[in-house]
Amino acid sequence: MNFNKRLFFFVLVLLFSTSFISALSSNPFALNIALGSSAIVYGDEQIKEYKTVLFAENTSRFILNTEVSTHLFLDDYISLNIGSILGFDWFKNTNANLFLLKYDIFAGIRIYPFLNGFNFGIDYICGGLSNFLKVYSTSDENIKSATVVSDWSNGFRLLAEYIFVVESSKYSPAIGCYWQNMPRNNGYDNSFSVYAKLVIR
């Protein structure tokens, strides 16, 4: 599946998620908008080489995750979830710039065991990763500026969050964290993320 097709599927799920906005006044549905950051351990050998050769010293890094999803509450204890994640990871120094774009779609389940805002869940995730490398100077002549698009892969994530329920308001803030595992080429990417979320019902 090429890059354009992947972006098409990502946008399709994003539009599907946000299409429920018109139905938010009905109790079973909720729209979730989240913003967060991650600590990411890449399993791809090429990215590891970039980090070792180009970004070992004097490197600034910026990581941002955005997420849009829709919940369908089956009852007070359980909900189904579908949505999309867009992640940005940027390395920069005098040697090079490396920009990694992650685009995922997911579906999963949330369990609310105590009915006071705490929940945990698991998601099945499909997604891709695109690397945009611009090299200015390097001691390794084999490393050159390039754009690399990974194969589409399937993974999962485990999460826990707390929703601060605001009585008589359809807006509720939430905080959470998750671990995501995704196979990439011959390795696995592991992301440890924290986020803040707005739940709209």
Image: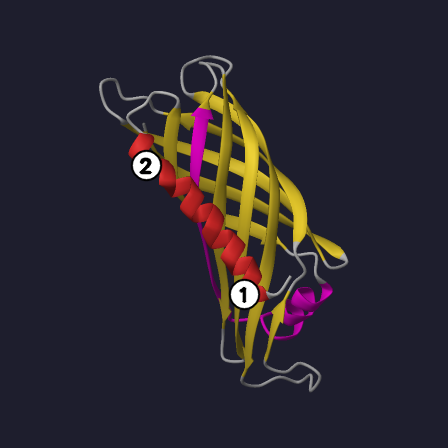
The answer to which image quadrant residue 199 occupies is top left
Counting from the top left corner in percent of width and height, residue 70 is at 43, 34
Amino acid type, label 2: Ile
Residue 192 in view of the camera: yes
Residue 152 horizontal side relative to residue 83, left or right: right
Q: How is the image coloured?
A: secondary structure
**How many labels were placed on the picture?**
2
Dot 2 lies on which element?
helix
Q: Residue at x 64, y 71 (%)?
A: 50
Quarter that holds the C terminus: top left
Label 2 environment density (alpha carbons within 10 Å; few <14, some 14–19, many ≥20): some
**Image vertical order of residue 181 relative to residue 151, above or below:** above
Residue to which mark 1 is pinned: 4
Quarter that holds the N terminus: bottom right
Residue to which mark 2 is pinned: 21
Task: Give the extent of the magenta segment.
Answer: 45-72
